[in-house]
Amino acid sequence: MTDSSTTSWLLHGVDFTSAPSKRKTITIASGRLTGDTWRIESLHALTDFASFSTWLEQPGPWLGAFDFPFSLPRELVEQLGWPTRWVELMTHLDTLSRGELRTAFKGFCDARPVGNKFAHRATDGPAGSSSSMKWVNPPVAYMLHAGVPLLRAAGVSLSGMHPGDPTRIALEGYPGMVARSITAASYKNDDRSKQTPQRRAARAVILDHLDTGNYRFAIRLDAGDHRDALLDDATGDLLDAALCGLLAAWAWQRRDVRFGLPEFDVLEGWIVGA
């Protein structure tokens, strides 16, 4: 393993979007872990993929948990006759437009019975995550289609899946898994009409547990001057970035045991902490 100092590595949480803009940004929370406390040092909002690519190329050492799927379900890939090696599969996806991706996935779903339309990765069960082939609500397939090529082009290492720069390491994260370990209440919405006091109260509950480490992953959050921003952001983007940052910190504590990742199907990938 590279430098094992807990304070020299920056640990990032990345809340991703497949259509970044000034209204909906790629949101990044960055900080360092001391003991069991991850302290946020900065928050960034990137409005386009070019800015994100530049950010990915910043020198290490850093480790990030990224909120988008790194691959597709094996069942889907095999039925479509697509490559079953991860690199070759990702190269194949690069040749497809979003429309072509949607057509292929919709054809797969249309041929299946109600209640079992989507294929799932093995990690989806323990993580409680959506199928990575979904193109709506949320469009995680498009997030994969946009995000993975940027990781590959930047030469980062996808731990357990694809070698790259050992001082710039990417793990797949899922903030909803962390939030639901605290409360089942909805805590965010992009629709302004649905940004209710109840959802703000749910964010407050989540932050209270993160402050003390009283939740499943037990990493304390020190948000410092950023705490009010995490509470007040009704879209939940800032909080989601912080939740991914806590997953990065949890993984960093387990850096000598595969960042806490189990043995998994390298074609499908795995959500850290699931």
Image (tube, grey):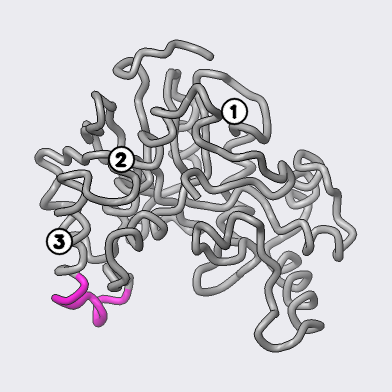
Residue at mark 3: 204
Q: Amino acid at mark 1?
A: Ser
Depicted 35 relative to depicted 82: above or below: above
Q: Secondary structure at mark 1?
A: strand
Q: In this view of the protein, which residue sits in the foreground, 43 or 183?
A: 183
Residue drawn at (24%, 82%) of the image = 193
Residue at mark 2: 29
Does the segment drawn in magenta span residue 194? yes
In-image side of 47 versus 221 (left or right): right
Q: Are marks 2 and 1 in contact (CB under 8 Å)?
A: no
User: Does label 2 or label 1 sit earlier along the sequence?
Assistant: 2
Q: Tell me how far mark 3 sits from mark 1, CA to CA.
A: 35 Å
Residue 122 in the image, given as x and y percentages of width and height: 65, 56
Magenta segment boundaries in residue numbering: 191-199
In-image side of 105 versus 240 (left or right): right
Q: Amino acid at mark 3?
A: Ala
